[in-house]
Image: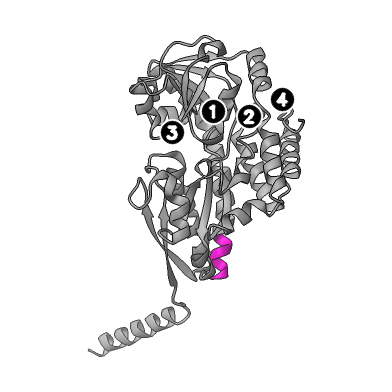
Amino acid sequence: MINWTKRSLMGAALAGMTAMPVVAQETISAVVIDGYPDRSLWVREFSNFFIPEVDRRLAENGNYVMDWQENYGGSIVKPRGVLEGIQLGLGDIGIVTTIFHSSKLPSQGISAVTPFVSSDARAVAKAVDEIAREFPTMQNEFAAQNQVYLATGVVLDSYQVFSSSEVASLKDLENKKIAGAGMNLRYLEGINGAAGVRGGLTDFYNMVQTGLVDAAMLWPEAGATFKISEVAPYMLSADLGAVNTKTVTVNQDYWNGLPGEVKGVLQEVAIAYRDHLAGIAMDIAAESEAAYIAAGGTIVEVSDEDRAAWAAAMPNIAQEWAQTLNDAGEPGSDMLAAYLAKLEAEGFVGVRDWSQP
């Protein structure tokens, strides 16, 4: 009995000594939203990389733990509704598909208005994100939507054209109806008689299958994910270029209530997620093209001459973009020049100099 009491007392004392230095963790809830399904690359990697990395870094100090509540695939918002959803507080953190909001987020179009420059997602993501940090324009646009900009995401190595009928060259796209999203519809102005039809990634399969369009502009990974080869078995490899289409943002009111340590970790991990996502996009690009061929698809390479001719036939949408920002009192021309210079420093020079009128 005496020995039992001693053991009990010693156990209680040790338990007390162990518990004394432990500081209670504060739990912070975070509602994450995106309208796209969780099989989408950027959503999957938000779950598999962003969230665990935030948890890991916060655990190093042990002051805070996140209670993540993930809502994807339209459970709270549709793909086009993330910007408004975060603005209204329907979600705390979201992945905004910026190509749907050219009027509210015009500066986000910087890579979309400079096609045929770089098909390296890593270089484009880094360049756009640096522009967002060096110039106040991008962050101010999100602030006007009650949001804090965290980082840019590039999920595609290059837009290509997927067609339901056989294509052998750029000429075969003439007088075709081609689906696209946002600024890339302007690319079609360089093709005789081609008509752009607005749609979203989750719509393209049905748009082609039903004959609403003859082709669609998307990238190989998305083509594999959404089984586009079933309805569009011909891919015209034009290497239109990588484009930033995703931005991680946080509701401003939610942000204001976060501890500084949590804010810092979210900012750091957003940049890591930017690079992680772009790296995966590049890693799986070749695999996705192989999967497309294995599923019955045929890839046709556009010649350098056709690419140059296509670019030359397009209106200078980069200059239009810059001038629109200039007219609004923003440094559009400076942003464009800085962006192209960053890509050139990485070895990427376009088939057309978009900085020249």
What amino acid type is highlighted by mark number 1? Tyr
**Proximity of marks 1 and 2: CB atoms separated by less than 8 Å:** yes
Mark 2 lies on a secondary structure that is: loop
Mark 1 lies on a secondary structure that is: loop
- First reached walking from the N terminus: tag 1 or tag 3: 1
Q: Which mark is residue 124?
A: none
- First reached walking from the N terminus: tag 4 or tag 3: 3
Mark 4, Cα crowd under 10 Å, few <14 / some 14-19 / many 20+, is some
Q: What residue does disc 3 label?
A: 199
Residue at point 58% right, 15% down?
302
Q: CA distance from mark 1 to mark 2?
A: 9 Å
Quarter that holds the N terminus: bottom left
Residue at point 51% right, 58% down?
250
- Callout in the foreground (1, 3): 3
Highlighted magenta segment, given as a residue range = 259-265
Which is the main secondary structure of the residues drawn in magenta?
helix
Residue 108 in percent (x, y) is at: 60, 44
Residue 232 in percent (x, y) is at: 40, 19
Q: What residue does disc 1 label?
A: 159
Quarter that holds the C terminus: top right
What amino acid type is highlighted by mark number 2? Pro
Q: Is residue 80 above or below residue 159?
A: below
Which image quadrant for residue 39?
top left
- First reached walking from the N terminus: tag 4 or tag 1: 1
Q: CA distance from mark 4 to mark 2?
A: 9 Å
Q: What residue does disc 2 label?
A: 115
